[in-house]
Image: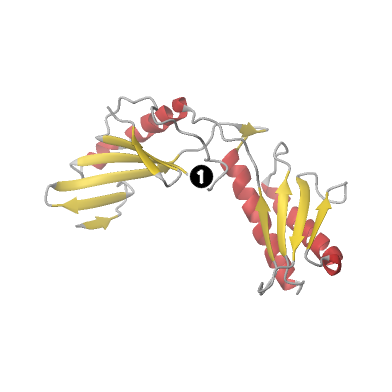
Amino acid sequence: MAGSRQPKSPTFIVHAPSGAVGIEVTEYFRPERIDGSPLQEQESLCHQIAHVATQKCIESSLPNLYVAVSFERARRIVKKDVVPVAEAIAKLVSDTAAHVDWSLKVVNDGQLPECIDDILMYRPAGLTEPFVGFTATTWVPPVAEDELRKIVLNKEKKLDAYRRRCSEVWLVIVIDGFRIASLSELPPDASRVTTAFDRVIVLHDWRSAIELSN
């Protein structure tokens, strides 16, 4: 048995004596928007800001602090915000690092960009360089079953090409509990879908698999 990836192929092709099974893997994202921007875009920009801020803290030889940034979820971040917001975070760390014994929380009272709620700094033992990450909280909504159906219909457009190389084609939809943009609650009795895929499976929170195909 072997796996392969070819142009215009499913994510994986598993070859077995009974034939080739193509497995297309995609991710479910929550449908809500922040001022028109998808949650996955906002989450990606938060990661970029944290990464750039980390590099700036390292380049400036700042103390080995763990910095957790809480972003204002209702305020949209755009690409041009990444560098200036990261610089503002690094400057705050530089200005306040000397006051961090074990931990220090700085609430944004106008001294930081509006997309930031607060910043929490720790001085943990064993940290070898400064690190900036971000924290987020959210309510966990039920999965939008219409979105699941849209994913299936969109992926079905590729089925003809996939079936030229595979005797069976499965679709796996990942709901990732470690990503705010994907985190959703899937009921065990989720509605089935009528589809041309041989199987449609939802991998929920990396803990359970539920088949949706009839």
Would residue 86 be visible to someone looking at this image? Answer: yes
In terms of image quadrants, where is residue 172? top left
For the C terminus, give its image quadrant. top left
Q: Nearer the viewer, residue 185 or 36?
A: 185
Residue type at the position of mark 1: Gly
Q: Nearer the viewer, residue 177 or 5?
A: 177
- In the image, is residue 196 above or below residue 65? above
Which residue does the image show at 14% across and 47% down from the upper left? 19
Q: Position of residue 26 (x, y in %)?
A: 41, 42
Q: Residue furthest left?
A: 17
Would residue 84 be visible to someone looking at this image? Answer: no
Which residue does the image show at 19% across and 57% down from the upper left? 1
Please indicate whether residue 164 sits to the left or right of residue 117 in the image: left
Which residue corresponds to mark 1? 177
Which residue does the image show at 41% across and 33% down from the upper left? 151
Q: Position of residue 125 (x, y in %)?
A: 69, 72
Q: Position of residue 178 (x, y in %)?
A: 53, 48
Circle 1: element type: loop
Please indicate whether residue 65 sits to the left or right of residue 167 in the image: right
The structure's colour scheme is secondary structure
Please indicate whether residue 27 sits to the left or right of residue 57 in the image: left
Q: Nearer the viewer, residue 49 or 214?
A: 214
